[in-house]
Image (cartoon, grey):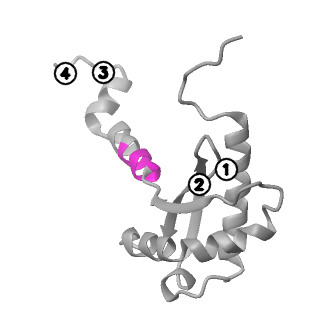
Amino acid sequence: MTRSTSSAPSQRMLRVGEQVRAAITQVLQRGEVRDDVIEATVISISEVRMSPDLKMATAYVTPLGVSDHSIVIEALNRNARYIRGRLGQQLRQMKYMPEVRFRDDTSFDNYKKIDELLRSPEVQRDLDGDNDEQ
């Protein structure tokens, strides 16, 4: 049986990514990170993608109620080593503790743009089947 060369994550990468996501969420919810920006912001972690060797974790986050996400992302990355150290309690079973990096999750913006397009009069006209106006 040959292994596929697709870039889709393995079941193990997905499982570990979810464990890392839950662990980071706990660290942030407990207020363990002493940073004014992080403490003053509600942060949603939508996904953690693991590298194939499980040594790198990329966390996609959405700071809620903040217009400039880059400030929060910068604060999280500034504290990434500390957060990584706090993950050890929840991820004892891992051979290596993954390095964590944070990225802005733009998928919600993409969904919003698609929704706005679908609600536009031109698309509504096409969806309603009203093509007589042409």
* Tag 4 near tag 3, CB within 8 Å: yes
Q: Earlier in the sequence, mark 1 or mark 2?
A: 1
Label 1, label 4: how far apart the Cα atoms are: 51 Å
Q: Earlier in the sequence, mark 2 or mark 4?
A: 2
Please name the residue shown 58% across and 73% down the image: 81
Amino acid beneath label 2: Ala
Please name the residue shown 58% across and 53% down the image: 56
Q: Nearer the viewer, mark 3 or mark 2?
A: 2
Q: Look at the image and give the residue range highlighted in magenta.
A: 107-113
* Tag 1 near tag 4, CB within 8 Å: no
Horizontal side of 131 relative to 57 (left or right) equals left
Amino acid beneath label 4: Glu
Residue where numbered disc 1 is placed: 17
Q: Residue 125, labelled with which disc?
A: none
Please tell me whether mark 3 sits on a helix, a strand or a loop. loop
Q: Earlier in the sequence, mark 1 or mark 4?
A: 1
Q: Nearer the viewer, mark 1 or mark 2?
A: 2
Residue where numbered disc 2 is placed: 57
- Residue 26 seen in the current view: no
The answer to whether 31 is drawn above or below residue 3 in the figure is below
Q: Residue 133, labelled with which disc?
A: 4
Label 3, label 2: how far apart the Cα atoms are: 49 Å
Label 1, label 2: how far apart the Cα atoms are: 7 Å
Q: Residues within 10 Å of mark 4 (few under 14, many from 20)?
A: few
* Tag 1 near tag 2, CB within 8 Å: yes
Depth check: 96 or 82 in front?
A: 96
Residue where numbered disc 3 is placed: 130
Q: Earlier in the sequence, mark 3 or mark 2?
A: 2
